[in-house]
């Protein structure tokens, strides 16, 4: 069983997202520790990029702050290497194709393998163009995570059949960000996916309350929460770790209560 699959083994996975280097890498390390301590089953780490097209204003702001701090991909690799002994849950990078191209594809995935990363999510790489990334990632044992959106329709079965690690279900059209309601028929998307694969699927984009997380985990295999956590970090800066820990604890409790 892959390490990512273990995150979903006999449980609903809670998957938090943070942008590395916001407000600084030392704080990011402390946040990762709080995430794991309070029940994260898998962690998404954002590598900041100057044009994060899938992100709403909250995560865009985090990208800008991290880049202003001069955070580089190498700094993030070093940070992950430093915490990997303590952080035992699976971790995946979320970033953009350009970040990997400019770093060098083989070099990037080889480094991911060396520091103990488990997967990568590239929201700007459509399914039809994933092969060149997927091949190199697979060579180094890194899962290329597929995304399924409400508009994927007739492509869902094809995407799901080739999926590795887990499938990221985009709950809403548009960019990331908290939403008061999630109107997409996520249940229908999950049913289509489950007809063709056993690869677990988790729902992201717009989940900000324990009730939403619990509901999405109920109908899928887990929930992904990003903007709500990144907002707590923006509001609290270096004091954010304990606040993030408390938020995650509440989210995870909602799972158990449902």
Image: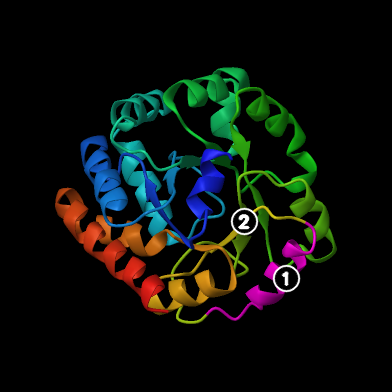
What secondary structure predominates along the stretch shown in magenta? helix
- Residue 57 placement: quadrant: bottom left
Q: Is residue 134 above or below residue 201?
A: above
* Residue 54 visible, this orientation: yes
Q: Residue at x 28, y 64 (%)?
A: 249
Q: Is residue 153 above or below residue 133?
A: below
Q: 105 or 120, which is in the foreground?
A: 120
Q: Is residue 33 above or below residue 200?
A: above
Could you tell whether 235 is left or right of 211 in the image? left
- Residue 40 placement: quadrant: bottom left
Q: Quadrant of the N terminus?
A: top right
Residue 33 appears at what percent x and percent y? 26, 44
Q: 57 or 121, which is in the foreground?
A: 121
Q: Are marks 1 and 2 in contact (CB under 8 Å)?
A: no
Q: Where residue 213 is drawn, which disc sits there? A: none
Q: Which residue is mark 1?
A: 191
What are the residue bounds of the magenta stretch? 182-196
Q: Residue at x 52, y 53 (%)?
A: 9
Specify few, some or many for label 1: CA neighbours under 10 Å numbering under 14, 14-19, or 20 or more.
few
Q: Where residue 200 is drawn, which disc sits there? A: 2
Q: Residue furthest front?
A: 10
Residue 13 appears at what percent x and percent y? 47, 59
Q: Residue at x 14, y 52 (%)?
A: 239
Mark 2, secondary structure of its residue: loop
């Amino acid at each position: 069983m892959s390490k990512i699959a273990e995150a979903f083994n006999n449980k609903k996975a809670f998957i938090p997202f943070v942008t590395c280097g916001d407000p600084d890498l030392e704080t990011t390390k402390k946040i990762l520790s709080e995430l794991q301590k309070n029940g994260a089953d898998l962690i998404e780490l954002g590598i900041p990029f100057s044009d994060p097209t899938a992100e709403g204003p909250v995560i865009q702001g985090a990208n800008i702050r991290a880049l202003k701090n001069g955070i580089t991909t190498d700094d993030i690799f070093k940070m992950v290497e430093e915490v990997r002994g303590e952080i035992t849950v699976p971790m995946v990078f979320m970033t953009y194709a350009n970040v990997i191209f400019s770093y060098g594809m083989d070099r990037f995935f080889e480094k991911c393998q060396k520091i103990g990363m488990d997967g990568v999510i590239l929201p700007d790489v459509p399914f039809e163009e994933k092969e060149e990334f997927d091949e190199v990632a697979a060579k180094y044992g890194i899962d290329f995570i597929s995304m399924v959106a409400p508009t994927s329709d007739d492509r869902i079965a094809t995407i799901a059949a080739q999926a590795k690690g887990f499938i990221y279900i985009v709950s809403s059209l548009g960019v990331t960000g908290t939403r008061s309601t999630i109107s997409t028929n996520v249940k229908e998307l999950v049913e289509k996916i489950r007809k063709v694969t056993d690869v677990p699927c988790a729902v992201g984009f717009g989940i900000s309350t324990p009730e939403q997380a619990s509901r999405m985990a109920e109908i899928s295999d887990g929930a992904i929460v990003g903007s709500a956590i990144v907002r707590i970090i923006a509001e609290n800066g270096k004091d954010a770790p304990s606040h993030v820990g408390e938020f995650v604890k509440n989210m995870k409790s909602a799972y158990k209560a449902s």
